[in-house]
Amino acid sequence: MKDDSVIFSRRSIRAYDSTRRPSKAQLNDLLKAAMYAPSAMDARPWEFLALTEPSSIESAMSVHPHCSSLKDAGAAIVVCGNLDREFKTPCGGYYSYDCSAATQNILLRAKELGLGTCWCGIAPEKERIEAFRRAFNIPENIEPMALVIIGYAAENPDAGERYDEAKIHWESWPAEA
């Protein structure tokens, strides 16, 4: 059974209509959706860098090797983690989980608004993290995690069927045969 709801129809978009740009109101809507994501101990360690100016778009493209479609999309949000605000345990911090949830909210809300998106990873690539810090004057306690390209899709890729019952294990993992 095919479901056309946002969660089942959202796809990564790599071709955008260069004649249309997301509005500031739409970007603010996406940022609000991001901030409604769950976070460990409600720490909300996220910070966001919105990019809409051509010079900022060019800077992002110059430091990220996989975001050339950003030029046609015309907007992006860099999702960052505030290392001073994340919930930490002796085993490590939770910012990457929290910021991933915020990123997913951006992707789903964009689809609801009729926008296309593509999540381009920054972390854990240390060189890419440092390149974004230099390009956008990001302080050391803020770690850029993801670049989300946002625009009007010029393609509509089919998600196909992704449900795979073989990946579900009820109650315990089956014993090896």
Image: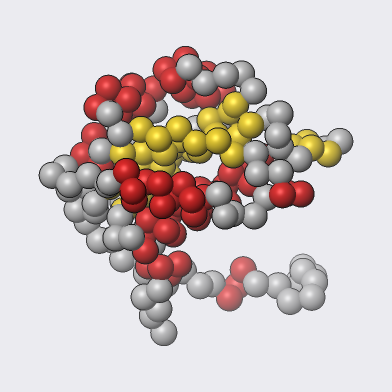
Q: Tell which of 132 and 84 is nearer to you.
A: 84
Q: Residue furthest left?
A: 19
Residue 117 drawn at (x, y percent): 35, 50
Question: Number of labelled discs?
Answer: 0
Q: Residue furthest right?
A: 90
Q: Residue at x 36, y 75 (%)?
A: 4
Q: Residue at x 25, y 61 (%)?
A: 156
Position of residue 92 relative to residue 131, above or below, is below
Report whether residue 150 is seen.
Answer: no
In this rendering, would 157 be left or right of 104?
A: left
Viewport quadrant of the C terminus: bottom right
Q: Tell which of 122 and 112 is nearer to you.
A: 112
Residue 161 drawn at (x, y percent): 42, 72
In this rendering, would 137 be left or right of 87?
A: left
Report whether residue 59 is seen.
Answer: yes
In this rendering, would 11 be left or right of 37?
A: left
Q: Residue at x 27, y 29 (%)?
A: 53
Residue 17 drawn at (x, y percent): 17, 48
Q: Which scheme is used to colour this image of the protein?
A: secondary structure
Viewport quadrant of the N terminus: bottom left
Q: Residue at x 72, y 49 (%)?
A: 42
Position of residue 123 relative to residue 141, above or below, is below
Q: Residue furthest front?
A: 25
